[in-house]
């Protein structure tokens, strides 16, 4: 991820390790005291895996991409602060990580019950590719695929 992206008033860039506490604060699960999520956020920041969206008011959301899913990119986490939802923040984060993806395929997943995430993924051009039962009892995981096309999409990579 080489170049910062500023899409309108919302900028997208690589997070610094020092921003992990701020990210915990905008993550609805971590902010409620989930120690494992807090530790994951800190680890992802240390590893340089986090991309953030921000505007003049501060951090709006974050996205984590790992490359451990069959050696392909995988969006492990996408979180938008509740007050920033519905402003295109999630879409911009997804576009930025797709533009910066170094593998031929980029995957993510969400629970079948997470209708807002499914709508976002469809709007962002991701395709459903499979369903896994047994991860969360009674709420199957729906997997999505994006085939990154940096040159075609016109999105700049993220620093």
Image (spheres, helix red, strand yellow):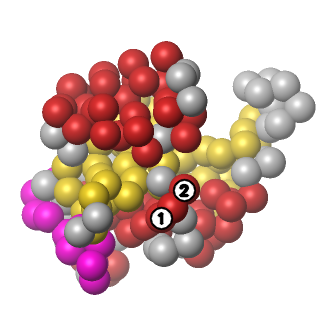
How far across and down, in percent of the image, does residue 156 sit? 20, 71
Number of callouts: 2
Q: Residue furthest left?
A: 2
State yes or no: residue 57 in magenta.
no
| Residue 97 at least partly seen | no
Residue 23 drawn at (x, y percent): 35, 40
Q: Name the residue under label 2.
A: 82
- Calculate the distance from the C-alpha at mark 2 to the C-alpha at mark 1: 5 Å
For the point 64% across and 57% down, which residue is it? 117
Residue 51 x, y percent position in the rendering: 28, 49
Residue at 67% from the left image edge and 67% from the top image edge:
119
Residue sitting at x 29%, y 64%: 57
Q: What stretch is highlighted in magenta?
A: 1-11
> Toward the viewer: 54 or 103?
54
Tell me if I can see residue 8 in this picture.
yes
* Residue 92 x %, y %: 39, 69
């Amino acid at each position: 991820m080489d170049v910062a992206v500023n899409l309108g008033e919302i900028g997208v860039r690589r997070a610094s390790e020092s921003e992990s506490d701020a990210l915990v604060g905008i993550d609805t699960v971590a902010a409620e005291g989930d120690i494992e999520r807090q530790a994951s956020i800190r680890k992802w920041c240390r590893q340089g895996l986090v991309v953030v969206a921000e505007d003049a008011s501060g951090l709006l959301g974050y996205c984590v991409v790992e490359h451990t899913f069959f050696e392909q990119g995988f969006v492990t986490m996408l979180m938008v602060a509740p007050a920033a939802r519905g402003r295109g923040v999630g879409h911009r984060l997804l576009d930025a990580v797709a533009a910066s993806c170094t593998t031929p395929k980029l995957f993510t997943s969400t629970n079948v019950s997470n209708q807002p995430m499914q709508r976002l993924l469809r709007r962002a051009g991701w395709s459903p590719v499979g369903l896994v039962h047994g991860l969360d009892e009674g709420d199957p995981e729906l997997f999505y695929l994006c085939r990154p096309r940096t040159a075609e999409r016109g999105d700049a990579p993220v620093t």
